[in-house]
């Protein structure tokens, strides 16, 4: 990770990703456009497996003669029953819960249609996740789960959850292990998909993110000699959510989606052209250099401190990069409310640039604080380590550790289909062609 902040940092006029190589040629699509259903794709990481029949007997282990063997633990009795195809219990549930010796723990439970169950517990900042697997049966609104393995070792952990609205509430469990509050988990997404379409751009998203989206054309804005080019931009399409009123200045923590024509974007400024070219190279190489800033449009009038949770994501007719990032103007403690998730992409034909923004939260980000005097001097000296520690922690977290769940945001951009139709500009009025007599009169007037 390359950090560009120094103690004397001032507001940058233009923030661009740093790859000065020539623009990649994306005119020839690297793949055919994706064919996707009208709803958003399922949650990434959903795992299913086919359980063995209840009467299946494990094969006897091969034994060498005269060799002592360890006692094999008895198999846990597993309840096996078919899961109703329309069961409301099937799906992924998660929660960010307190922990005694960590910032918190992220619990994700997958209840699969084939009767298998997987629960993953990630203690924030505490190494690898704990994975428990087993089976489950449905009893009305109750999910009776038996976890028979933990990190590949036998166990017998039985938990009953009851679905109340969109939340699984633990009703039968080991309170000595999970405390009086148990493991309340909320469904990832509602399953209700909202679709939007404006100006030839369409996408869909789970209603857990928003209830609606509104598209509009924004006219071209002139480039100014000011930070972030003074908001200079070509004609573009903007989507806002939940009837959010437009703001005078760009705020990357507000949910929004933009579509720009690439050639007009590059013509704005050499720095912007260089930034777009750097993203084109990332998408052509399918590689994201960890020590390189990732270009973001609209421009942010400060410096990119870090990017993490970085993933290459394909949408219907293009590709891009989704990541969590943070911008600052000086060396100071991170303000968690200013971190945001963004997606920066380009269509397969190289003609259109797509960007999306969303506010993001997680307990892994430190609480806001102020430092001054001698404390600030010490903080500034350790600033790089401070940022590295944040990035290390945040990068290790699963999608469920964030609010909103990263899977919902990534599924939204995967559904993008970008074939914009910008309004035809009205030609400027021109003076009428003079008649021969009018031209002669004009020449006579000049002589006089």
Image (cartoon, rainbow, N blue to C red):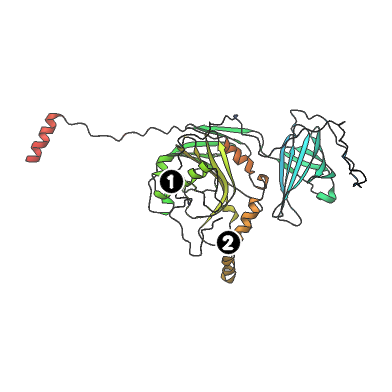
On the image, numbered disc 2 is attached to which residue?
A: 384
The furthest residue to the top: 85
Q: Quadrant of the N terminus?
A: bottom right
The answer to whether residue 401 is visible is yes
Callout 1 crowding tier (Cα within 10 Å): few <14, some 14–19, many ≥20:
few
Classify residue 129 as left or right of residue 285: right
Give the class, few, some or many, for how many residues have Cα within 10 Å of label 2's Cα (few <14, many ≥20).
some
Residue 280 higher or lower than 204, as above or below = below
| For discs 1 and 2, the disc positioned in front in the rendered view | 1
Percent x, y of residue 340: 57, 49
Between 22 and 160, the one lying in front of the other is: 22
Q: Residue furthest left?
A: 448
**Residue at horizontal 30 percent and vertical 35 percent from the top:** 428
The residue at 65%/45% (across/down) is 399
**Quadrant (top left/top right/bottom left/bottom right) for the C terminus:** top left
For residue 402, above or below residue 187: below
Q: Is residue 143 visible?
A: no
| Residue closer to the observer: 100 or 74 | 74
Position of 83 with respect to 412 (left or right) is right
Q: Are marks 1 and 2 in contact (CB under 8 Å)?
A: no
> Residue 22, which numbered label?
1
Indicate the position of residue 293 as horizontal and vertical percent values.
52, 52
Residue 372 x/y as whole percent: 57, 68
- Asked whether, in this view, residue 42 is left or right of residue 437, the answer is right
Image position, residue 17 (x, y; %): 48, 50
Task: Indicate which disc, 1 or 2, sits on the residue closer to the N terminus.
Answer: 1
| Label 2 residue SS | helix
């Amino acid at each position: 990770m390359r950090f560009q902040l120094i103690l004397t940092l001032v507001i940058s006029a233009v923030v661009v990703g740093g790859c000065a190589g020539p623009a990649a040629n994306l005119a020839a699509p690297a793949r055919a456009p994706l064919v996707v259903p009208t709803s958003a794709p399922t949650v990434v990481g959903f795992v299913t497996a086919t359980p063995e029949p209840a009467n299946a007997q494990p094969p006897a282990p091969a034994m060498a003669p005269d060799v002592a063997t360890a006692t094999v633990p008895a198999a846990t009795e597993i309840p096996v029953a078919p899961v109703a195809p329309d069961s409301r219990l099937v799906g992924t549930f998660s929660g960010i819960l307190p922990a005694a010796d960590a910032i918190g723990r992220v619990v994700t439970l997958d209840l699969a249609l084939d009767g298998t169950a997987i629960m993953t517990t990630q203690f924030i900042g505490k190494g690898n996740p704990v994975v428990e697997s087993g089976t489950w049966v449905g009893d009305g609104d109750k999910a009776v789960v038996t976890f028979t393995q933990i990190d590949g070792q036998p166990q017998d952990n039985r938990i009953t959850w009851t679905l109340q609205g969109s939340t699984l509430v633990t009703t039968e469990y080991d309170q000595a292990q999970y405390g009086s509050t148990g493991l309340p988990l909320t469904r990832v997404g509602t399953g209700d998909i909202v679709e939007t379409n404006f100006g030839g751009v369409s996408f869909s998203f789970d209603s857990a993110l928003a209830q609606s989206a509104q598209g509009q054309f924004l006219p071209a804005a002139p480039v100014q000699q000011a930070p972030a080019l003074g908001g200079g931009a070509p004609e573009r399409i903007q989507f806002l959510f939940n009837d959010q009123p437009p703001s005078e200045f760009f705020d990357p923590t507000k949910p929004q989606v933009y579509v720009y024509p690439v050639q007009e974007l590059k013509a704005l400024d050499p720095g912007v052209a260089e930034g777009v070219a750097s993203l084109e190279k990332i998408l052509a190489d399918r590689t994201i250099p960890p020590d390189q800033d990732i270009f973001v449009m609209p421009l942010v009038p400060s410096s990119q401190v870090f990017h993490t949770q970085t993933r290459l994501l394909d949408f219907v007719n293009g590709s891009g990069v989704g990541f969590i990032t943070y911008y600052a103007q000086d060396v100071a403690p991170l303000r968690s409310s200013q971190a945001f998730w963004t997606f920066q992409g380009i269509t397969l034909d190289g003609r259109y640039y797509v960007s999306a923004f969303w506010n993001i939260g997680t307990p892994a980000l430190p609480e806001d604080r102020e430092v001054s005097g001698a404390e600030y001097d010490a903080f500034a000296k350790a600033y790089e380590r401070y940022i590295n520690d944040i990035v290390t922690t945040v990068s290790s977290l699963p999608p469920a550790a964030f609010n909103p769940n990263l899977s919902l945001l990534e599924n939204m951009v995967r559904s993008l289909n970008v074939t914009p139709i910008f309004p035809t500009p009205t030609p400027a009025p021109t003076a009428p062609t003079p008649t021969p007599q009018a031209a002669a009169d004009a020449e006579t007037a000049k002589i006089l």
